Amino acid sequence: MSNKITIAIDGFSSTGKSTVAKRIAKELGYVFVDSGAMYRAVTHFAIEKDFISAKNFNKKGLISQLDGVELGFKFNNDLGFAEMYLNGSNVEKKIRTMEVSSFVSQVATIPEVREQLVKQQQQMGEDKGVVMDGRDIGTVVFPEAELKIFMIASAEAKAERRYKELIERGDKVEYEEVLNNVKQRDHIDSTREDSPLLKAKDAIEIDSSNLTLEETFQSVMQLVRMTLEDSE
Ligand code: DC
């Protein structure tokens, strides 16, 4: 298995995309990129600079300062994956809060933000050997990816997964709040004008509602093996 491919994993919020992408990358020795973390980091920046709150959304202000947003991933050996850095600071924990989750889909509608992030994502995948998860990876970032997965799950399965994650981190959240956030984000992500969440024509759909993480991982690995054989 010496030939490297590009693996795009798109789909709805909290379908297990990142967890599976991370494991696939580890198994293959590929680079894992959580593109959602990049949108979350820009959102964290926007909150800190007061460009977005429950009362206002100053898109122009945010766009004018995008040059001051420097994003990077640094591999953490203890965790076994790369953490998100914003202007030199580790923001991995800060970008996973409900506050960031509640604004990120709005920030992700801004074409200028998308253009900047897509460019960086394409650079990260230049040499192939990358597993990237997100919403537009198979359609916009890597339309030529050899393997495209599209993950779906029921709203309840998604909310339960996300709720468990937040509770395990020690966040105080209500299940209903998480369910509403997941539904709202999926709606905004699928209906926005620029690069909406769409299943690429050549993507393979996986419904993770009734699958364990191990089962989802095994299904994707089987597709990876087939794709690698085909690309030899
Ligand atoms: O994968 P995630 O839930 O951490 O992503 C957070 C948000 O970022 C998601 O609601 C929509 C946006 N996003 C996007 O628009 N395009 C991507 N490629 C990845 C994420």
Image: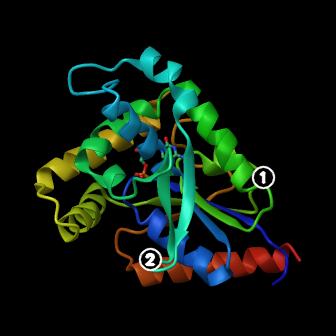
Q: Relative to residue 108, is residue 30 drawn left or right?
A: right
Residue 4: percent from left, percent from top? 80, 72
Which element carries disc 1, helix, strand or loop?
loop
107, 45: nearer the viewer: 45
Q: Is residue 56 above or below residue 196?
A: above
Residue 73: percent from left, percent from top? 56, 58
Q: In this view, does 171 lie above or below 20?
A: above
Q: Answer yes or no: is residue 50 visible.
A: yes
Which element carries disc 2, helix, strand or loop?
loop
- Tell me which numbered mark, 2 or 1, is placed earlier along the sequence: 2
Q: What residue type is labelled 1?
A: Glu
Q: Which residue is drawn at 27% across and 61% down?
A: 162
Q: Mark 2 points at which residue?
A: 79
How busy is the neighbourhood of tag 2: few (under 14 within 10 Å), some, or many (20 plus)?
few
118, 140: nearer the viewer: 118
Q: Residue at x 58, y 28 (%)?
A: 67
Residue 45: percent from left, percent from top? 40, 36
Q: Residue at x 62, y 50 (%)?
A: 137
Q: In which quarter of the image is the C terminus?
A: bottom right
Q: Answer yes or no: is residue 142 visible.
A: no
Total numbered badges shown on the rendered structure = 2
The label number, if any, that marks residue 144 in the structure image: 1
85, 106: nearer the viewer: 85
Residue 175: percent from left, percent from top? 13, 57
Label 1 CB less than 8 angstroms from ligand 1: no
Q: Residue at x 48, y 56 (%)?
A: 84
Q: In this view, does 66 lie above or below 135?
A: above
The label number, if any, that marks residue 18 in the structure image: none
